[in-house]
């Protein structure tokens, strides 16, 4: 449950941070403040000897993340006017996030196994303090980006859109709001099951009584390397997926729709759980070979990479302008619910046998994927303006 709280609140807190950077304080000042608070939280984790201290760490890290996370993307978005340059910048930023995740979990996994995980929190704190100094040093390269709150910085655009915001929603805009809410519901299911996957890896397959063989010769693979696998998959498979989508887009019928990609992500999630459950059935009374968990992790990561891009890009593209912040809030709140819930879901699954339970989870995910795929046409009609379609000027694909 503590793990669930950490994930949930680090999803929700950036929503509050965005409000502050929009209206009160420039993002470039919030980012180092957030990193300092996160560093302080990790110091508390380093010295934690009770559940109360761990919860204090969670609170500080969540607050710091709220001030740091979304503001970084906000500044990046204001450094480039050209859309291609901006796309490249975000791709680079995403790559570095995954590289950092891979290095962090790989190195800290080794340190945690050999020295103890409390020392890992100290390293995280030191890294955050170094990052703070490095970011402040780099202010001179940012120009004016993030100096003022984003709403003030964009006062001209705000003035120009005031009259537009007073107009009632059109029929197509209402349909798009409905589509966003519907997809947000499916995202809750996806992220609950995606985050749930890590719990049995750590507590069923690993640990003192773990049922998987984590030994390669005389070397014991750190459990944290399962997290590293996800980051590595994003680094290696991300460009491959990008080329695949680009190739599909060149077909006469165009790329797969966003809804079909969402459905495919859900189906891959279900397939990963089929592998999870089958692994337990086929191992019999023996320890599970680690290769099963590797295959499970790769399919799980593929599902994430297909599903996750839907979020912000989908909402940015189809949300009515005056409701953009509210619709982003709906998506963030869906992630918050998923992050808050998966720990309780895992606790509930412990009442039942492993394989049947995870076959059921696989079935739920697959059924959701099939429903989304079947509803693709109707969902497309919710977000595409019929008049625009007739003019062939806009396509969801």
Image: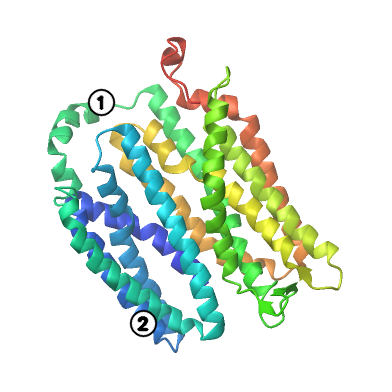
Q: Quadrant of residue 217?
A: bottom right
Residue at (55, 57) in percent of width and height? 232
* Neighbours of disc 1 within 10 Å: few (<14), some (14-19), many (20+): few
Where 354 falls versus 181 (above or below)? Answer: below
Q: Is residue 257 visible?
A: no
- The figure's colour scheme reads rainbow
Nearest to the observer: residue 12 or residue 74: 74
Q: Quadrant of residue 392?
A: top left
Numbered disc 2: secondary structure: helix
Q: Is residue 163 left or right of residue 386?
A: left
Residue located farthest toward the bottom when viewing the structure as drawn: 49
Distance Cα–Cα, label 2 vs label 1: 50 Å
Residue at (63, 72) in percent of width and height? 202
The reply to whether the C-beta atoms of the residues labelled 2 and 1 are less than 8 Å apart is: no
Numbered circle sitting on residue 279:
none
Between discs 2 and 1, the one toward the N terminus: 2
Where 325 falls versus 136 (above or below)? Answer: above
Q: Position of residue 346 (x, y in %)?
A: 63, 66
Numbered circle sitting on residue 167:
1
Instruction: Determine which residue is flagged by label 2.
Output: 44
Q: Position of residue 151 (x, y in %)?
A: 18, 44
Where 10 falls versus 49 (above or below)? Answer: above
Q: Quadrant of residue 275?
A: bottom right
Nearest to the observer: residue 39 or residue 155: 39
Q: Position of residue 314 (x, y in %)?
A: 44, 36
Q: Position of residue 354 (x, y in %)?
A: 75, 66
Q: Is residue 128 visible?
A: yes
Nearest to the observer: residue 397 or residue 129: 129
Q: Is residue 260 left or right of residue 184?
A: right
Numbered disc 1: secondary structure: loop
Residue at (37, 50) in percent of width and height? 93
Residue at (43, 51) in percent of width and height? 95
């Amino acid at each position: 449950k503590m793990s669930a709280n950490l994930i949930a609140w680090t999803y929700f807190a950036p929503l509050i941070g965005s409000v502050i950077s929009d209206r009160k304080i420039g993002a470039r000042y919030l980012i180092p403040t957030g990193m300092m608070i996160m560093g302080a939280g990790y110091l508390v984790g380093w010295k934690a000897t009770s559940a109360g201290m761990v919860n204090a760490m969670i609170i500080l890290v969540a607050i710091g993340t709220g001030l740091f996370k979304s503001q970084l993307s906000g500044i990046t978005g204001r450094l480039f006017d050209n859309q291609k340059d901006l796309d490249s910048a975000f791709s680079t930023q995403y790559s570095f996030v995954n590289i950092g995740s891979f290095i962090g979990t790989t190195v800290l996994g080794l340190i945690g196994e050999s020295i103890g995980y409390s020392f890992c929190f100290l390293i995280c704190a030191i890294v955050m303090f170094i990052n703070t100094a490095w970011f402040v040093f780099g202010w001179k390269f940012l120009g004016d980006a993030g100096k003022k709150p984003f709403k003030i910085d964009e006062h001209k655009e705000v003035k120009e859109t005031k009259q537009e915001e007073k107009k009632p929603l059109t029929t197509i805009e209402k349909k798009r709001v409905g589509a966003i809410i519907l997809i947000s519901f499916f995202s809750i299911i996806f992220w609950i099951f995606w985050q749930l996957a890590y719990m049995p890896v750590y507590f069923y397959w690993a640990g003192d009584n773990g049922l998987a063989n984590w030994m390669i010769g005389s070397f014991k693979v750190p459990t944290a390397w399962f997290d590293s696998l996800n980051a590595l998959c994003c680094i290696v498979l991300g460009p491959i997926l990008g080329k695949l989508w680009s190739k599909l887009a060149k077909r006469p019928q165009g790329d797969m729709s966003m809804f079909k990609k969402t459905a495919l992500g859900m189906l891959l999630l279900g397939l990963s759980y089929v592998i999870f459950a089958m692994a337990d059935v086929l191992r019999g009374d023996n320890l599970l070979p680690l290769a099963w968990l590797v295959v499970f992790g790769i399919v799980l990561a593929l599902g994430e990479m297909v599903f996750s891009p839907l979020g912000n890009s989908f909402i940015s593209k189809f949300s009515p302008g005056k409701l953009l912040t509210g619709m982003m809030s709906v998506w963030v709140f869906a992630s918050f619910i998923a992050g808050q819930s998966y720990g309780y879901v895992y606790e509930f699954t412990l009442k039942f046998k492993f394989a049947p339970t995870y076959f059921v989870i696989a079935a739920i995910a697959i059924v959701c994927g099939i429903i989304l795929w079947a509803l693709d046409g109707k969902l497309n009609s919710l977000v595409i303006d019929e008049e625009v379609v007739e003019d062939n000027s806009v396509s969801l694909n």
